[in-house]
């Protein structure tokens, strides 16, 4: 018997492998590995307009990390440190997320995905966290994950899954500023940066600024996502 099918949003990137260099749809293997380890069936969703329709074929959704959300999506001009816009991916993932929210499909939004969730619900972002907190521990070096401690808020789904305090791996230079409609803060770092949010009134809509897929020994968040999908299927 197979577990819940989990759609994971993919990157559209110029990639080089074997004999070729061309545009590819890809995702870090760590995402698919943690879903499989938790008992799910991972499926990569391409960053195209077709993916919103695929939400009807999955039991849960992971919005993966990646480059910055375009500031125009939340009514801001780009700051000097902000990545160039990835319009196709922004558009595709917003459509995927809205379809998932319409159908109450369980959602785990990771890093960029956590920020996109906030923007989709009308929120805004801080475009460069070091300017806000005066240090670079959230993203110490290119391609290096920082380790930070976060504290979860009382009576949140996130606390029920990971406990009151937890150490996490992160790599982000942007963060939630004004909360989107219906979201509540579920965890903060020691410097008060928002590290998790959740959406009230849904089976499971959680955004985490950290990267749970980077710790193969800690499946609590992914397991919580799969349990929500299983419960939804049983109730259908």
Image (tube, rainbow, N blue to C red):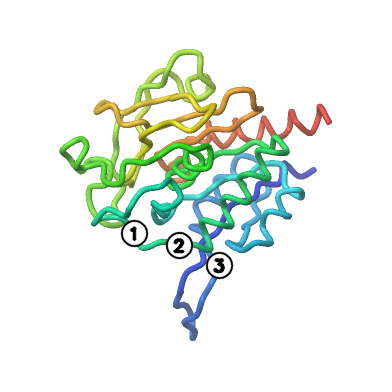
Q: Residue at x 63, y 58 (%)?
A: 45
Residue position marked by numbered label 2 in the rendering: 86
Label 2 crowd bin: few (<14), some (14–19), many (20+), radius 10 Å: some
* Left or right position of 17 against 6: left
Residue position marked by numbered label 3 in the rendering: 25
Pinpoint residue 48: horizontal percent, then vertical percent: 61, 63
Label 1 crowd bin: few (<14), some (14–19), many (20+), radius 10 Å: some
Which element type, helix, strand or loop, lies under badge 1? loop
Foreground: disc 2 or disc 3: 2
Q: Does the residue at mark 2 contact the one at mark 3 (Cβ under 8 Å)?
A: no
Q: Does the residue at mark 2 contact the one at mark 1 (Cβ under 8 Å)?
A: yes
Q: Residue at x 48, y 35 (%)?
A: 218
Q: Residue at x 40, y 39 (%)?
A: 124
Q: Of the residues under marks 2 and 3, which one precedes in the sequence? A: 3
* Left or right position of 62 against 186: right
Q: Quadrant of the C terminus?
A: top right
Q: Residue at x 30, y 46 (%)?
A: 127
Q: Quadrant of the N terminus?
A: top right
In this view, the residue in front, 16 or 182, is: 182
In this view, the residue in front, 187 or 33, is: 187
Pinpoint residue 214: horizontal percent, then vertical percent: 43, 45
């Amino acid at each position: 018997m197979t577990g819940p099918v989990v759609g994971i949003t993919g990157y559209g990137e110029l990639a080089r492998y074997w004999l070729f260099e061309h545009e590819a749809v890809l995702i870090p293997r760590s995402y698919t590995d943690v879903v499989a380890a938790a008992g799910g069936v991972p499926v990569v969703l391409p960053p195209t307009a077709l993916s919103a329709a695929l939400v009807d074929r999955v039991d849960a959704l992971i919005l993966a990390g990646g480059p910055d959300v375009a500031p125009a999506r939340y009514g801001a001009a780009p700051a000097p440190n902000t990545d160039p816009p990835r319009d196709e991916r922004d558009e595709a993932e917003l459509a995927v997320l809205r379809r998932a929210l319409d159908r109450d499909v369980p959602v785990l939004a990771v890093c960029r995905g956590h920020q996109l969730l906030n923007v989709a619900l009308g929120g805004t972002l801080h475009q460069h966290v070091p300017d806000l907190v005066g240090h670079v521990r959230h993203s110490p070096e290119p391609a290096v994950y920082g380790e930070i401690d976060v504290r979860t808020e009382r009576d949140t789904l996130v606390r029920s899954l990971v406990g009151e305090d937890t150490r996490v791996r992160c790599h982000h230079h942007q963060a939630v500023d004004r909360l989107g409609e219906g979201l509540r803060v579920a965890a903060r770092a020691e410097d008060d940066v928002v590290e998790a949010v959740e959406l009230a009134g849904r089976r499971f809509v959680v955004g985490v600024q950290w990267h749970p897929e980077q710790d193969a020994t800690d499946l609590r968040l992914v397991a919580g996502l799969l349990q929500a999908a299983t419960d939804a299927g049983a109730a259908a």
